């Protein structure tokens, strides 16, 4: 399956996908890694793996809409069946999300629908939560609001800081993100009207719990 990956930063989740492509556990071909930041280290990860890269600086555009339209033109030249947001730190316009509806997924560091947006680890600790985690979801017009495909849960420990919690959550991201991509590439995972669908059966709101640490 042809895949395009969008990034803004270090690209550790991208690396998990690259590793899966190289060891053939993921039936995908990453056609390009696209970043809105020229200094994103994920671009170096892609180059080391021999994967094409593109950079489109959002600061060069007068509006979010103009940037997203330019992004669509770049992405579509690769004819991807799946667009993967692996730490792409941009709020997407409705036009963009509709264009890729049902074939774009994102990894988010919280147990959605909790803590949409930023600073999820800090918010979970401050709220006194006992557990936290990460979610893979289909992307819709609602920020971090599309149907959840998969989640992993980690306990919040007594002395956790946002940094220590983020490290443990990231480990789980590297597990459930490639697994979600694999299921989609195998045409087992799809987006339904109000939920993710696995093997023809609608999943619960939290999606598939691939490894639950409760």
Image: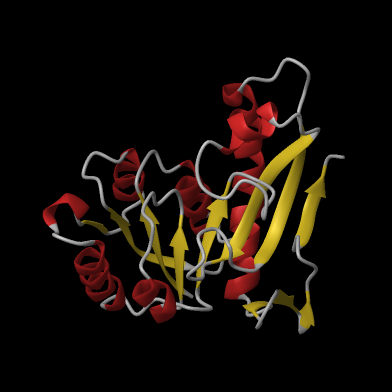
How many numbered badges does the structure rendering display?
0
Query: Which residue is drawn at the image coordinates 34% and 80% (left, top)?
Result: 79
Q: Is residue 89 left or right of residue 67?
A: right
Residue at 38%, 63% in the rendered image: 92
When asked about the image quadrant of residue 110, the answer is: top right
The structure's colour scheme is secondary structure
**Residue at left offset 26%, top offset 51%:** 36
Q: Is residue 94 above or below residue 151?
A: below
Q: Nearer the viewer, residue 21 or 214?
A: 214
User: For the point 39% across and 52% down, which residue is it?
Assistant: 88
Query: Where does the image place residue 137, in percent across and percent down from the top left?
Result: 60, 63
Residue 114 appears anywhere in the view = yes
Left or right of 96, for residue 140: right
Query: Relative to residue 16, is residue 96 drawn left or right?
Result: left
Any part of residue 25 in sight: no
Residue placed most toward the observer, 27 or 146: 146
Q: Position of residue 114 (x, y in %)?
A: 67, 49
Seen from the viewer's position, the closer of residues 122 and 32 is 122
Q: Furthest-top residue in view?
A: 159
Q: State whether residue 200 is above or below residue 4.
A: below
């Amino acid at each position: 399956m042809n895949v395009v990956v969008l990034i803004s930063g270090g690209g550790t989740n991208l690396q998990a996908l690259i590793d899966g492509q190289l060891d053939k556990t993921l039936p995908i071909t990453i056609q390009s890694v696209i970043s809105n930041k020229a200094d994103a280290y994920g671009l170096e990860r892609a180059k080391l793996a021999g994967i094409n890269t593109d950079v489109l600086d959002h600061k060069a555009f007068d509006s979010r809409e103009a940037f997203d339209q330019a992004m669509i033109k770049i992405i579509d030249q690769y004819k991807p069946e799946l667009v993967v947001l692996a730490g792409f730190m941009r709020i997407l316009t409705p036009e963009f999300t509709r264009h890729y509806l049902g074939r774009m997924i994102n990894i988010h560091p919280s147990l959605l629908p909790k803590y949409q947006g930023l600073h999820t680890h800090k918010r979970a600790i401050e709220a006194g939560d006992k557990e936290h985690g990460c979610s893979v979801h289909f992307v819709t017009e609602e920020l971090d609001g599309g149907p959840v495909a998969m989640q992993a849960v980690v306990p919040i420990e007594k002395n956790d800081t946002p940094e220590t919690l983020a490290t443990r959550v990231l480990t789980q991201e590297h597990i459930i993100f490639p697994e979600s991509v694999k299921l989609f590439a195998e045409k087992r995972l799809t987006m339904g009207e109000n939920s993710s669908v696995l093997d023809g059966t609608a999943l619960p709101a939290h999606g598939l719990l691939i490894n639950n640490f409760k």
